[in-house]
Image (spheres, rainbow, N blue to C red):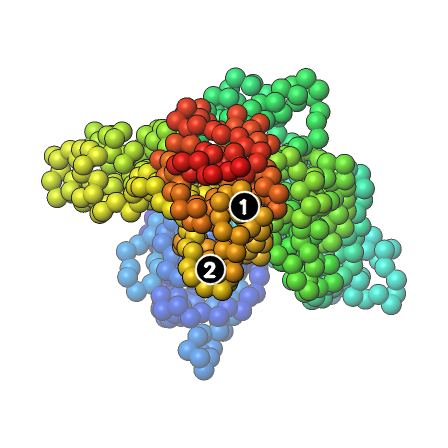
Amino acid sequence: MEVLLIMAPNKTKVRRMPLLPLRGLLVYPSMVQPLDVGREKSVKALEKAMVDDNMILLCTQSEMNIEEPTQEDIYRVGTIARIKQMLKLPNGTIRVLVEGVIRAEVIDFLSNTEYYEVNVRELPEQEIVNAEIDALMRTVLNQFEHYSNLSKKVTPETLAAVSDIDEPGRLADVICSHLSLKIKDKQEILETIDTKERLEKLLNILNNEREVLELERKISQRVKKQMEKTQKEYYLREQMKAIQKELGEKEGRAGEIDELRSQLAELEAPDPVKEKIEKEIDRLEKVPASSAEGGVIRNYIDWLLSLPWSKKTEDDLDIQKAEEILNEDHYGLEKPKERVLEYLAVQKLVKKLKGPILCLVGPPGVGKTSIARSIARSLGREFVRISLGGVRDEAEIRGHRRTYVGALPGRIIQGMKTAGTLNPVFLLDEIDKMAMDFRGDPASALLEVLDPEQNNTFSDHFIEIPFDLSNVMFITTANTAHNIPRPLLDRMEMLYIPGYTELEKLKIAERYLLPKQKKEHGLKEEQLFVSGEALMAVVREYTREAGVRNLEQLIASLCRKAAKEIVRDEDKTVTINAPDIKDYLGPAKFRYGMAEEADQVGAVTGLAWTEVGGDTLVIEVTVMPGNGKLTLTGQLGDVMKESAQAAFSYTRSRAEQLKIPQDFHEKNDIHIHIPEGAIPKDGPSAGITMATALISALTNIPASRQVAMTGEITLRGRVLPIGGLKEKTMAAHRAGIRKVILPKDNEKDIQDIPESVRNDLTFIPVAHMDEVLKHALVRPAEVH
């Protein structure tokens, strides 16, 4: 029942009635619309309206996904509608047929918990017809006719029915109800009370819709021109691409292709590379999305786009700064540092220089890898490291053909991608540890990489396009040079990094290892103090290595034990002096000064070279009654056994001059033994040592414990040169030896030995075995 409350100033009455919120739908006056109502409040509002006068206010929600809208979620202007029919459906919802009657505005919401109830004011239309309105109506009808022709959604019957409408306001409402518009736009038409203004807004909307439809038609026509009648699938794909292009969307394969083309446009690369990538993108575009080949092509394009074809870093050619960085990071290693500074100086003068290939050879733990990192830092270049230890497949270097499943580029190209620049410092670690098998020889594949004349067109099986490696500074590391194939060694500049002297180890421990381990163990500078004497004791009595890796582990052990004490007593400061070392690290592992305590008959100290540096070994000879059998023990290699035979033959040939019985080899068995029998030993450099020990045993003259020797012997007693003199000399120094006998041809190598070691030793260059005996035996043998 209608209740009259007040009279509004504009003579329109205010009514109280239930409100039905609509979701995603809007009803205009004179419009008949079926509605499905399921919300509890909405059902009760309908029931109230049916009890009263079948009239209800229909207002639209601003957001259709809100289940329980508040006053703010409902538009204030709606349509008063008459309920014409109501039917309950089996699923509990109610289907209602409503007819819009008049626009109305919500004045306020009444407090009603069962349903929405409001006071509304009707908004009657001012139906004024004049020439301008008439012209607007004709224009709107004309535009609607164009729209219906383009849209195919408006039937001819609807167009005819609309053309018969005389009232301008109703015409606007009916046309708007047939357009596919957003609720916001439809609501704007509903809220426009002025008829003329409503027609003008509708005209703008029709113009925009018509332009969109014409654009769709142009897209469709453009796609049809590009396809053949039989290519239905191609047509559909092109149509989707064209639509997405106009909408600015990047979805599916079309978006992926556009993304790749934009990356290609930004790529700095030579023209052949760009042409290759463009060709591959075109191939990818034609391949169906479900095809496995598409993934292979996409992977290949991604690799080509991610490689640094032209990008370089600017070299920092400040030699002073580079020298400071190298000295800051490493103690000693003068030759590698000098070589890097020379490279910088030449770069500065010529501006363009092919990247050198340096090979750092030396025992483990001397800092080969870390100096390569420092070189990169001093040059201001990116640093890449790949380990070649155990690599035995040629494809690891050159990559796999793309025909294989899971194919990838080789490690060189992968490293260049990681670096992101064309001129990094590239470290090939452990190049001497490569192997070969039925899959090829990776060392041979490296020949092209490490040749400055060829590597500007390096060919990877996966990439297939020549890649320029000539700007890369390659640095390789190895423990021994003899394991590297000769053609590969020929392409590299050898820089030998020897082991450290005791003094160098002490400085490295003080400047680098101790501060680093303190930091890693969370110790403050003042919480732990290790004296220089204590560090020297660790160096001498707990390590016997060319590098400092084991030394660092022992310093870490000191820091751990100090940390344990500090955690127990936070105010404690730990001081470690030389006598305290055994409490922290246990008894000394090595006796400093391994020289024999007394001169012995048939025992001579020799010098040996190993992969981890130099070492001393005592060669023992025992003469026993027998029938001339020569026994060699100590796991000796073939070359060393032959050296022993040569020493034995030389001794027999000199028996008369040395006052040795001529038939000693018939009446005696001779046993030559080299201790530490579990360790394989080989090489000719122990020849003079074995000869001296044999002569000492046969003449019964003791050999001096202060003398160590190295050199190859010939059958006529000549002493031939050997290698590794620096390491052997440092081992002698560590063992407390005072004199070193060396081949005269090795005299030139003495200058490579550190000055602190040279000053403590006496070097005796010899050319013949007679000179060796003169210095090695405690008294002269009776030589005639």
Residue 202 visible, this orientation: no
Position of 356 with respect to 565 (left or right) is right
Which element carries disc 2, helix, strand or loop? strand
Dot 1, crowdedness within 10 Å: few (<14), some or many (≥20)?
A: some
The amino acid type of the residue labelled 2 equals Asn
Closest to the camera, between mark 1 and mark 2, is: 1
Q: Residue at coordinates 13% horizontally, 35% vertically from top-left?
A: 572
The amino acid type of the residue labelled 1 equals Glu
Name the one closer to the observer, 347 or 204: 347
Which residue in the protein does label 1 denote? 656
Dot 2, crowdedness within 10 Å: few (<14), some or many (≥20)?
A: some
Position of 317 with respect to 267 (left or right) is left
Position of 84 with respect to 356 (left or right) is left
Marks 1 and 2, how far apart at CA: 17 Å
Which residue in the protein does label 2 denote? 668
Q: Residue at coordinates 49% horizontally, 55% vertically from top-left?
A: 664
Q: Residue at coordinates 52% horizontally, 17% vertically from top-left?
A: 320
Reply above or below: 476 against 142: above
Residue 494 location, quadrant: top right
- N-terminal label among 1 and 2: 1
